[in-house]
C-alpha cells in the first residue's frame, strides 16, 4: 500500500547517444528536424523499450519519417539531464508541423524495486488496449531558415501502470518547451525519493537518480514549495519553502539531507 501511495503522489501531481544537460542542444539547423528524449523518472530500476520509428506530420503534405531505425532505450536511465537522440533528419520537407509520432516494439520490460530485499524484480509489460505509439501535439514551422529541435519528456511514473500482480505500459510524453529553466539538487539519506514542486497554479515532479541527483526542466518562473517524498516504503516527506525559479536559469537547491 505504501508503494502505491508513493507512485500515486507523483502520478496525480505531475502535469532521451546520451548527453549531459550542460551541452547546448537547443539550437536547430535550418530545414532540419531533431527529436530528443529525457525522462521524468519513476521508482523503477529500469524501463526497457524499443523505439521503432519517429515521424512528424506536416500540414498539407502528410507524415514525414524522421527515423525508422530501431533503438533500445532504458527510459529509467535518462535522469538528471541525460537524454537520447531519437531522430535527426536534415533537408526535411518545409511546412507547418503539428504532430510528432513515436512508435514502439511490443516487447518491453520493467524492473521494480523489491522493498526490503535489495534487488529488483523483472516484469514483462503488457500494452493491454493501449496503442503502440504516442502522438504529441506540436506547433512548428520548418523552412530554409528555420529548423525544429524538440526535447520530449517520457514520464515513467505515469507510463507504467500496475494491474493486479502485473504491469502495463501506456507511454505518457510531453514536450519540454524551456530546457533552461528549472531546478536541480542532490538528495542524501534516501535510496530513492520523489521531488514535487507546486506554485503559481502549476505542479512539477521528478525522482532522484541512483546517485541522489535530480533535475526538473521546463518550469515557469515563480516561487515554489518543494516536497521530497522519501523512498517507496515510507510516507515520510521533507518540505522546502521559497524555491525561486527565474527564466533561463536552473536553480540549485543544493544538498538536501533526509
Image: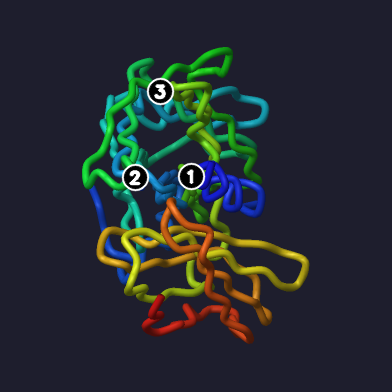
Q: In front: 186, or 39?
A: 186
Whole-number angstrom distance, CA of label 1 to CA of label 2: 9 Å
Q: Is residue 160 above or below residue 61?
A: below
Q: Residues within 10 Å of mark 2 (few under 14, many from 20)?
A: few
Say which quadrant the N terminus sits in.
top right
Whole-number angstrom distance, CA of label 3 to CA of label 2: 30 Å
- Left or right, 109 with respect to 30, comes to left
Question: Mark 2 — residue?
Answer: 115
Whole-number angstrom distance, CA of label 1 to CA of label 3: 28 Å
Q: Residue at x 54, y 29 (%)?
A: 134
Q: Secondary structure at mark 1?
A: helix
Q: Residues within 10 Å of mark 3 (few under 14, many from 20)?
A: many
N-terminal of the pair, mark 1 or mark 2, is 1
N-terminal of the pair, mark 1 or mark 3, is 1
N-terminal of the pair, mark 3 or mark 2, is 3
Mark 1 touches mark 2? (CB < 8 Å):
yes
- Colouring method of the image: rainbow
Determine which quarter of the picture holds residue 130. top right
Question: Mark 1 — residue?
Answer: 3
Q: Residue at x 32, y 42 (%)?
A: 113
Q: Is residue 49 above or below residue 178?
A: above
Determine which quarter of the picture holds residue 96. top right
Amino acid at each position: 500500500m505504501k508503494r502505491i501511495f508513493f507512485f500515486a503522489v507523483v502520478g496525480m501531481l505531475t502535469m532521451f547517444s546520451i548527453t549531459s544537460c550542460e551541452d547546448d542542444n537547443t539550437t536547430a539547423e535550418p530545414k532540419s528536424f531533431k527529436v530528443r528524449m529525457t525522462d521524468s523518472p519513476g521508482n523503477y530500476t529500469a524501463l526497457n523499450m524499443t523505439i521503432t520509428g519517429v515521424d512528424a506530420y506536416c500540414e498539407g503534405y502528410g507524415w514525414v519519417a524522421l527515423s525508422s531505425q530501431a533503438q533500445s532505450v532504458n527510459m529509467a536511465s535518462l535522469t538528471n539531464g541525460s537524454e537520447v537522440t531519437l531522430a535527426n533528419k536534415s533537408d526535411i520537407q518545409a511546412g507547418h508541423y503539428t504532430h510528432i509520432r513515436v512508435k514502439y516494439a511490443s516487447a518491453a520490460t520493467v524492473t521494480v524495486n523489491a522493498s526490503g530485499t535489495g534487488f529488483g524484480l523483472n516484469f514483462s509489460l503488457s500494452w493491454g488496449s493501449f496503442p503502440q505509439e504516442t502522438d504529441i501535439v506540436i506547433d512548428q514551422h520548418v523552412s530554409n531558415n528555420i529548423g525544429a529541435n524538440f526535447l520530449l519528456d517520457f514520464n515513467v511514473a505515469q507510463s507504467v501502470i500496475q494491474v493486479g500482480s502485473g504491469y502495463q505500459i501506456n507511454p505518457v510524453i510531453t514536450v519540454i518547451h524551456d530546457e533552461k529553466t528549472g531546478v536541480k539538487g542532490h538528495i542524501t539519506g534516501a535510496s530513492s525519493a520523489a521531488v514535487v514542486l507546486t506554485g503559481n497554479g502549476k505542479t512539477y515532479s521528478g525522482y532522484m537518480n541512483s546517485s541522489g541527483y535530480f533535475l526538473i526542466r521546463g518550469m515557469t518562473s515563480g516561487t515554489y514549495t518543494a516536497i521530497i517524498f522519501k523512498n517507496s516504503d515510507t510516507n515520510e516527506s521533507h518540505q522546502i519553502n521559497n524555491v525561486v525559479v527565474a527564466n533561463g536559469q536552473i536553480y540549485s537547491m543544493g544538498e538536501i539531507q533526509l
